[in-house]
Image (cartoon, coloured by chain):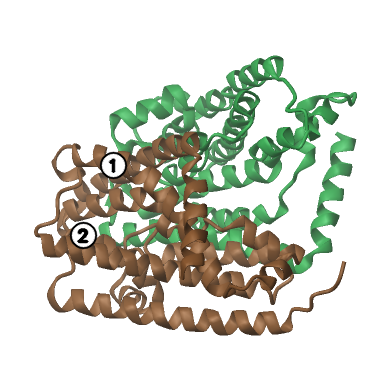
Amino acid sequence: MKLYLRYLSMHLRTAMEYKASFWSGTLGQFLVSFSAYLTVRFLMDRFGAVEGFTYAEVLLCFGAVLMAFALAECFARGFDTFSRLIGNGQFDRMMVRPRSLIFQVLATKVEFTRLGRFLQAALVLAWAVARAPVAWTPARALVLAEMILCGAALFGALFLCYAGLCFFTTEGLEVVNILTDGSREFGAYPLSVYGKTALRFYTYLVPLACVQYYPLLWLLGRDVPAWYALLPLGGAAFLLPAYGLWRLGLRHYKSTGS
Amino acid sequence: MKKYLSFFRVRFLTGLQYRAAAAAGIATQFAWGFMTLLLYRAFARAGYDRFPLPFESLSAYIWLQQAFLALFAVWFWDSDILEMVESGSVAYELCRPTDLYTMWYVKTGAARLSRAVLRCAPILLVAVFLPAPFGLTAPASALQFLAFLLSLTLGFGVVLAFGMLVYAAEFFTVSPAGLRVLVVALVDFCQGGLLPLPFLPAALRTALEWSPFGAMQNAPLLVYSGFLTGGALLRTLGLQLFWLLALVLLGRLILARGLRRAVVQGG
């Protein structure tokens, strides 16, 4: 843990060496998510509500997913750019060091410019928390925090899957983007709006709905069983199969030789 | 002229080699288009009377957008050019007996076109066979289809000219990566990459339609389904032509100034 903090401060200082680049990058990330927000806003303005969710309710969902994604992307970026580590042989050097591989990959890259996205998510979330028709209690606030943290774990697990697949393909697989970037984009709305089949996909295969749709229903006081509030933990459990895939890939790994 | 054609051919053929990547891209784009349409279906149920364009037109818009993503998405930067400007090996390019602007314009165009050629056919083919409001319908007349092709070409030209502006601006900044993220975020929204422009509030929509961004993917994708006809169609095509010429001229100016500033050191 102490070592990780050392790495963090190192990455922060590196980023600060190029201040103009850092700030324009952060602003850029902010704008990327801001345009996603504008999309939601213009659509909700025009139509009022979608599948029984109002603007404030959708924003609550959007903010939680966006914040989870920003956290995952900031800290687990090493897995997202993993094909480069394999391609240039840096991963081989990691394997001879006496530290866990996952730790090292996590520590190689920390992308602080993604805080622009985080900031955008925080603004949206603050607005939505104030406006959404939720009677806030400590328990409800805790569930919202659970949604965000478990969501971050789920996105981290998806990045881990992506890295695990890189062992087999060397190149990054563009298809996985539909699960990572796609989950962020389409997770902006409660997943029930995409219909039953999509909801089932996002419940049993990629459990995004567990950190998003089901606990949201509970937060909004809809008529659902109370255990829906604990489902985000199930979403975070996606880390287990992801870790399995990573191990499988690791055993299969042969160096690219460069 | 001949040398630029051969630049084009080399780049185009290189691009055609990446078939596995294209297959993966097709799957991604297909899933993306499908989810987007499911979202709009939910909004159509919420109030189809507030839809600014018929659902069939929207479906055509989404599928053409996915099929021709490589032509219009701003984030397909040419990493060769970026690296050349950053590392300074652009000096070698200047030694060639070619016009830098034309050469880069042709090269980036070829790279995008080869990507699009590999990817568009399967997506369009599947989209044609999808059930009624979600599929891609044929345009109403041959004339309309011709107008679409013309608009597609002009829009592609505008995107390339805009990209050249960014490459030229690279000469003036020390932090090009940040600049590019900014540009991508801005342009992608303004050209209707996230939300078709008709869905925007009226004032913003009009402003963007007159801007160079409206001359990018917005124009051809709306022309195809017959959403723009008559006077509106002629105005759109005229605007596209105007912006193409204006951006090329501006890009040439900026590039020339950038090159004057650049100092080539030995070594």
Q: Which residue position is annotated with label 1? A: B38
Q: Which quadrant does the C terminus of chain B fall into?
A: bottom right
Q: Is residue A198 left or right of residue B56?
A: right
Q: Position of residue A195 (x, y in %)?
A: 28, 34
Judged from the image, the secondary structure of the residue bearing numbered disc 1 is helix
Q: Which tint is chain B?
A: brown
In the image, residue A60 above or below residue B82: above
In this view, the mark in front (1 or 2) = 2
Q: Residue at x 67, y 66 (%)?
A: B176
Residue A16 visible in the shown view = yes
Find the distance from the CA under tag 1 to the CA under tag 2. Answer: 21 Å
Q: Which image quadrant is residue A44 in?
A: bottom left
- Pinpoint residue A92: horizontal percent, then vertical percent: 81, 28
Instruction: Label 2: state its secondary structure.
Output: helix
Left or right of B137? Residue A235 is right
> Which of B16 and A74 lies nearest the eye of the viewer?
B16
The type of residue carrying mark 1 is Leu
Of callouts 1 and 2, the N-terminal one: 1
Chain identity of mark 2: B
Number of callouts in the render?
2
The chain whose colour is green is A
Residue drawn at x 50%, y 26% as measured from the top left: A231
Which kind of residue does numbered mark 2 sit on? Answer: Tyr
Vertical arrangement, residue B213 with respect to residue B119, above or below: below
Mark 2 lies on residue = B224
Residue B54 x, y percent position in the rendering: 16, 56
Horizontally, is B55 left or right of B254 in the view?
Answer: left
- Chain designation of label 1: B
Rendered image quadrant of residue B157: bottom left
